[in-house]
Image (cartoon, helix red, strand yellow):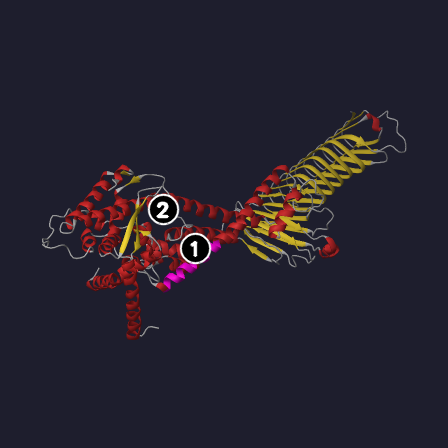
């Protein structure tokens, strides 16, 4: 008989258990022919060895511990019963065997199995079974199943997959249930296969897209791949499949662990535990996806009138995707309410119409109003991007945004139009708020109304841009606009690098300070504050005035035939101009002193006319 | 486990035991099999009792001349004992099968199965 301890590394207990078992067979078989007992032992030994090999198949180890040994011996059965199976003992052997070595194998439970509990059950005992298996409260499991969205569906599936405790105990099987179980198991495997194919695709696409973003080759990869596979370029779908991917990987990992340590794995038929594990993993994953539907929302080809944030969460991606048919996506305007702190609302306008339907698409392009009401504490960044515009000559729907920002909310509007795309989807922006606000990277007509708040605008390329505020400072820089108007009641205005045909800057009580301004028509007024303009270039006409404050103007260039009025009722006026401009200067001060270095200038009929007036203040005009 | 359950278990065991020899003979009648293999087949057919009891049964059948076995070397692992049915065994099996069919149909009539 092969000594198995020579081939495998037995723990002491395991070796002892096996020895005791053989010893008991010998004792029980005392009255049987020695040959038979020897042969029996030989066969049992062979059986034990094959079973050990089976059990160690996936672990790569040679270790046989007590648990494994006792499991094997337990399934072999009681030595007395085994020996009695040899038939009637030979003559003269009725003596009772009393000195059996007691070993505990009869009472060691077989590896804990997941089964539907017969003690703790409300319906089919699935939750109770899980609770017993994991050693947690069954109430917790029930709550998990009830509130995880798709838990009810999975409950039914699990009820079919997991064996009943009563059946497991008696070792019997009910044929009917067995049939259903194998059918469901087959469907489950099929389901996994169906999932894996798109998962592989989505993995490839995700990788391609990351690469694409890295090298900035937008249309090349994105349009053909995602449009071909999913019929859309929506990042939502990618997110969706990404989630499935992660869940599947989790399931695979579980499978691996099960194979390595518990000789299981769901690809090996028969291990119900792993099916249950995979099902739970999918349950979690799918619940997550369902949870995402609330937050991570896609509206493609639908008419959405009202969108409400349901729970705090990070992201809403609205994809306005017009179909090839040229039918307008949105017949109605959109209203978003309840945006909270940290929410990002991203609007992607995707228009894929081309070919024969192109004209129809152009005709049907419809203006769209989006109105967003934010909640206190909300912070929103609005990104209008045109990253999916692979063909540049489309007429895109005009977006008109209205944002109502209540008090206590800082608002940041970032309208990020990609440089190479000359479209601006956001054509019209209207913001009304009562707190600090910043607007940047905007290429759209905009109206901004604020109260008691500071506003900063930056990188604006707009047709018409108006900013009105009750009190609060305004910072503006890098603005190109045909009509740029800033009017505030009490705040100071600081403007820099402004280019506009009609430029209006007004403050009732605040100071105005600007540098590098180019305009055809300039109007710059403050009633009480000081006005100080540096490097101004005006082509047609400028009016710079303050009632009470001092006025200080530095012209960098004066066009011929242009007229300029610079005045202060009470304050001093200080003016500097390049000598080359040769302006005609008209200076009047009722009470103040006057110094004018352009007195001797020679001017013609074409010369720019500069009128400087003050009632009380001094006037100082100098050459640059 | 209460008395009733234990009784059911014992009676079930008795029932299975009666047909176990026939099942083993049938299993090895089409090709040679080793002990572990036979147990696996029995498990598939839901006829398994304690795994250990199959081996003494095989010894008994061998002693009765109904089956024969031979050792076969295996390249991976120990030499295995391959069992196959003897001529005498086959004759007995055929007769037993005939008997079994009678029992089966008789029982069906009594319990009203299809």
Of badges 1 and 2, nearer the viewer stands 2
Tell me the residue at 53%/48% (across/down).
A199
Q: Would residue A102 be seen by someone viewing this image from the given angle?
A: no
Structural crowding at the residue carrying mark 2, measured as other residues with C-alpha within 10 Å and reported as few (<14), some (14–19) or many (≥20): some
Specify the farthest residue to the front.
B87
Residue A31 lies left or right of residue A515; in this view the side is left
Residue carrying label 2: A263
Q: Earlier in the sequence, mark 1 or mark 2?
A: 1
The lab-note entry on whether marks 1 and 2 share a chain reads: yes
Pick the quarter of the image with the C terminus of chain A. Answer: top right
Structural crowding at the residue carrying mark 1, measured as other residues with C-alpha within 10 Å and reported as few (<14), some (14–19) or many (≥20): some
| Up-down relation of residue A590 to residue B72 (above or below) | above
Residues drawn in magenta:
A176-191
Image quadrant in which you'd find residue A148: bottom left
Q: Mark 2 lies on which chain?
A: A
Task: Give x and y (percent) for residue A161.
Answer: 39, 57
Mark 1 → mark 2, Cα distance in angstroms: 30 Å
Residue A455 lies left or right of residue A274; in this view the side is right
Residue carrying label 1: A148
Tell me the residue at 14%/49% (across/down).
A30
């Amino acid at each position: 008989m092969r000594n198995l301890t020579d081939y495998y590394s037995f723990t002491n207990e395991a070796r002892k258990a096996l020895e005791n078992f053989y010893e008991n067979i010998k004792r029980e078989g005392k009255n049987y022919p020695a040959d038979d007992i020897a042969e029996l032992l030989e066969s049992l030994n062979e059986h034990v060895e094959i079973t050990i090999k089976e059990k160690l198949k996936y672990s790569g180890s040679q270790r046989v511990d007590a648990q494994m040994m006792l499991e094997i011996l337990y399934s072999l059965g009681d030595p007395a019963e085994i020996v009695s199976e040899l038939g009637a003992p030979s003559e003269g052997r009725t003596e009772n065997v009393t000195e059996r070595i007691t070993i505990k194998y009869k009472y060691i439970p077989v590896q804990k199995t997941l089964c539907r509990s017969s003690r703790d059950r409300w319906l089919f005992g699935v939750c109770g079974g899980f609770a017993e298996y994991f050693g947690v409260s069954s109430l917790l499991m029930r709550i998990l199943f009830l509130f995880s969205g798709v838990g009810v569906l999975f409950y039914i599936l699990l009820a079919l997959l997991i064996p009943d405790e009563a059946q497991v105990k008696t070792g019997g099987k009910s044929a009917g249930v067995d049939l259903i179980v194998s059918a469901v198991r087959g469907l489950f495997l099929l389901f996994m296969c169906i999932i894996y194919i798109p998962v592989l695709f989505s993995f490839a696409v995700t990788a391609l897209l990351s690469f694409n973003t890295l090298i900035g080759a937008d249309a090349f990869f994105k349009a053909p791949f995602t449009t071909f596979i999913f019929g859309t370029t929506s990042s939502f779908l990618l997110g969706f499949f990404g989630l499935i991917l992660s869940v599947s990987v989790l399931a695979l990992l579980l499978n691996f662990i099960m194979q390595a340590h518990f000789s299981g794995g769901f690809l090996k038929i028969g291990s119900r535990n792993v099916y249950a594990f995979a099902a739970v993993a999918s349950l979690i994953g799918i619940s997550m996806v369902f949870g995402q539907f609330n937050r991570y929302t896609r509206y493609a080809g639908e008419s959405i009138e009202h969108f409400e944030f349901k729970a705090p969460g990070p992201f809403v991606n609205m994809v306005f995707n017009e179909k090839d048919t040229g039918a307008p996506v949105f017949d109605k305007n959109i209203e978003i309410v309840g945006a909270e702190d940290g929410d990002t609302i991203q609007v992607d306008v995707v228009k894929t119409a081309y070919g024969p339907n192109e004209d129809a698409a152009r005709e049907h392009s419809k203006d769209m109003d989006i109105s967003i009401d934010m909640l206190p504490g909300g912070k929103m960044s609005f990104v209008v991007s045109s990253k999916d515009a692979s063909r540049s000559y489309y007429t895109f729907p005009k977006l008109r945004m209205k944002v109502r920002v209540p008090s206590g909310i800082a608002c940041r509007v970032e309208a990020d139009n990609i440089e190479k795309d000359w479209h601006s989807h956001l054509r019209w922006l209207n913001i009304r708020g009562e707190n600090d606000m910043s607007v940047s990277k905007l290429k759209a007509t905009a109206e901004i109304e604020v109260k008691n708040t500071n506003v900063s605008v930056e990188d604006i390329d707009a047709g018409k841009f108006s900013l009105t505020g009750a009190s609060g400072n305004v910072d503006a820089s890098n603005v190109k606009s045909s009509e740029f108007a800033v009017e505030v009641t009490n705040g100071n205005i600081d403007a820099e690098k402004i280019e506009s045909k009609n430029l209006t800057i007004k403050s009732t009580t605040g100071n105005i300070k600007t540098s590098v301004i180019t305009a055809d028509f300039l109007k710059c007024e403050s009633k009480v504050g000081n006005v100080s303009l540096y490097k101004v270039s005006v082509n047609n006409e400028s009016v710079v005035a303050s009632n009470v404050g001092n006025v200080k103007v530095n012209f960098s260039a004066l066009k011929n035939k242009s007229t300029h009025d610079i005045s202060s009722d009470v304050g001093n006026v200080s003016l500097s101009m390049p000598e080359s401009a040769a302006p005609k200067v008209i200076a009047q001060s009722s009470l103040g002193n006057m110094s004018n270095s352009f007195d001797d200038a020679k001017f013609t009929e074409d010369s720019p006319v500069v009128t400087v007036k003050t009632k009380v203040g001094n006037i100082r005009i100098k050459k640059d | 486990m209460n008395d009733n359950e234990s009784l059911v278990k014992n009676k079930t065991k008795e029932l299975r035991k009666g047909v176990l020899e026939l099942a083993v003979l049938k299993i090895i009648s089409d090709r040679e099999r080793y002990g572990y293999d036979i147990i696996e087949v029995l498990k598939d057919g839901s006829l398994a009792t304690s795994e250990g009891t199959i081996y003494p049964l095989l010894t008994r059948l061998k002693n009765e001349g109904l089956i024969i076995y031979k050792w076969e070397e295996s390249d991976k692992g120990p030499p295995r004992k391959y069992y196959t049915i003897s001529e005498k065994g086959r004759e007995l099996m055929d007769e037993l099968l005939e008997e079994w069919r009678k029992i089966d149909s008789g029982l069906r009539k009594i319990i009203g199965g299809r």
